[in-house]
Amino acid sequence: MKALWDLPARASGELVLSEPLGYYPKFDLLLQSEVFGEEIEGDRGSDIFLAQCEAAGRTIGHIHSSGITAGTPHTVNVEIDRLLNRLEEFKMSSPSVYLALRDLLRQISAKADRVPPEAPVPSHGDYKYNQFLYDGTHFGLIDVEYFVQAEPSFDLGKYCGHLAPSVPKDWSDTAAAAEARRIFLDAYLAVCPDYLGARFPIYEALSLATRALVVTWSQSRNWEYTAQTLIALAYERLKTRWGE
């Protein structure tokens, strides 16, 4: 937290987050200043949402390029194994989703084995649009105290995997999500122009697979259709090369 607070991007206003005030290891308690603002609503086509996507791209770019070495290693196998372990809970209750997700994870794992891993960078670990608060002027990042060292595609894929609406009303919702995704990635590349994106499809597919598993667990209205839709999109993203 202190290393983030000391970054030039934070001093310039590009990176907005809490100031660390003290840490008490006996209680594993971190005190930090308040981040002002309200949660971002999920309307992908709103001006505020799109502005948040741009800010999020720059924010994670500054974090990835910061050189901070704190955080435990977090590899793609951690994500794959976590999903495989959770998936077994639904083998009997949701067999069609279970089989579809199992096959998807096999293909993700195979691609992860083929494509060389990226050099690890400091990573947020749970990077999504709802990790920002908006005060009317700035977008403040929250939940930054649990950093990991991971491939840059981990944060990018997780964020983009949560941009796709789970229940789009019509084609315009999907189009708005695609524009939000483009804005986010363009903003990131403006800060980190050397990013190559070879592993991005792997992590975006993992993010969508995670969402499908969450939907299956919650079993809300039309959950099976929603889960299968997210799985189909994950397949599409996995097979789409960076830049296409």
Image (tube, rainbow, N blue to C red):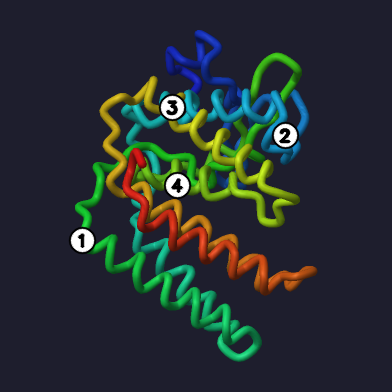
Q: CA distance from mark 1 to mark 4?
A: 18 Å
Question: Which numbered tag is attached to residue 186?
Answer: 3
Sequence-first disc among 3 and 2: 2
Inspect this view and state whether residue 34 appears: no
Quickly name the residue at label 4: 157
Q: Which type of secondary structure does the marked residue at label 4 adopt? A: helix
Residue with the mark numbered 1: 114
Tell whether 17 sits left or right of 72: right
Q: Nearer the viewer, residue 10 or 157?
A: 157
Q: Earlier in the sequence, mark 1 or mark 2?
A: 2
Residue at 52% x, 43% y is: 159
Q: Earlier in the sequence, mark 4 or mark 2?
A: 2
In the rendering, which numbered label is found on residue 40? 2
How packed is label 1: few (under 14 Cα within 10 Å), some, or many (20 or more)? few
For the residues labelled 4 and 2, the Cα–Cα distance comes to 19 Å
Q: How far, Cα to Cα, is label 4 from label 3?
A: 14 Å
Identify the image quadrant of residue 197: top left
SS type, badge 3: helix
Which residue does the image show at 71% across and 56% down from the upper left?
Answer: 167
x and y percent of residue 39 in the render? 75, 35
- Point out residue 43 in the picture as x, y percentages from the top left corner: 73, 38
* Screen quadrant of the C terminus: top left
Q: Position of residue 166 (x, y in %)?
A: 67, 56
Q: Amino acid at mark 3?
A: Asp
Q: Earlier in the sequence, mark 1 or mark 4?
A: 1
Secondary structure beneath dot 2 equals loop
Number of callouts: 4
Identify residue type, mark 4: Gly
> Marks 3/2: CA distance?
20 Å
